[in-house]
Image: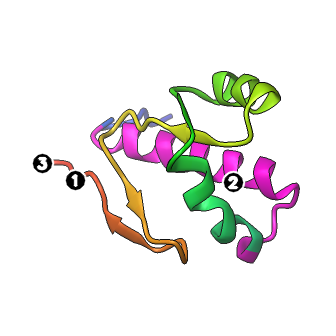
Amino acid sequence: MTGIGSFQYAPEAYDATILAALAATLARDDAGIRLQAQLRAASVGGLKCTYYAECLDVLVTAQAIDYAWLSGTLNYMAAGDPTSAPSGVC
């Protein structure tokens, strides 16, 4: 059995997974086109939240969330395309 050799991009992978889950929650659907439409809504302009359960709690009382990335800051254009993203150093 082989173990994990590196955790170098673990924060980025975690953030991408959480953002996709939040986008699916906001879209109430898991179709790719619907996720893309909610990426910005999950990460810009709402109340800050730092993990999935906290973000779900925020959505109970507020209409907008702003997922705070563990790996750095990610910004999206209105169309859902990233304008900047964190980068790791090898």
- For label 3, the residue is 89
Q: Position of residue 41 (x, y in %)?
A: 62, 55
Task: Decide if residue 21 is on the left or right side of residue 72.
Answer: right
- For discs 2 and 3, the disc positioned in front in the rendered view: 2
Q: Amino acid at mark 3?
A: Val
Determine the secondary structure under disc 1: loop
Total count of labels: 3
Q: Decide whether the magenta segment is chiefly helix, strand or loop.
A: helix
Q: Position of residue 66 (x, y in %)?
A: 53, 40
Q: Residue furthest left?
A: 90
Q: Which mark is residue 67?
A: none
The residue carrying pointer 2 sits among few (fewer than 14), some (14 to 19) or many (20 or more) residues within 10 Å by Cα, namely many
- For label 2, the residue is 23
- The Cα atoms of the two marked residues, 1 and 2, are separated by 22 Å
Residue 69 lies in the magenta-colored region: no
Determine the secondary structure under disc 3: loop
Pointer 1 with pointer 3, Cβ within 8 A: yes
Name which residue lies at 81% across and 70% down: 31
Q: Which mark is residue 87?
A: 1
Q: Taking 88 as reference, is 78 above or below it?
A: below
Determine the secondary structure under disc 2: helix
Which stretch appears magenta?
A: 8-33
The residue carrying pointer 3 sits among few (fewer than 14), some (14 to 19) or many (20 or more) residues within 10 Å by Cα, namely few
Q: Position of residue 34 (x, y in %)?
A: 76, 70
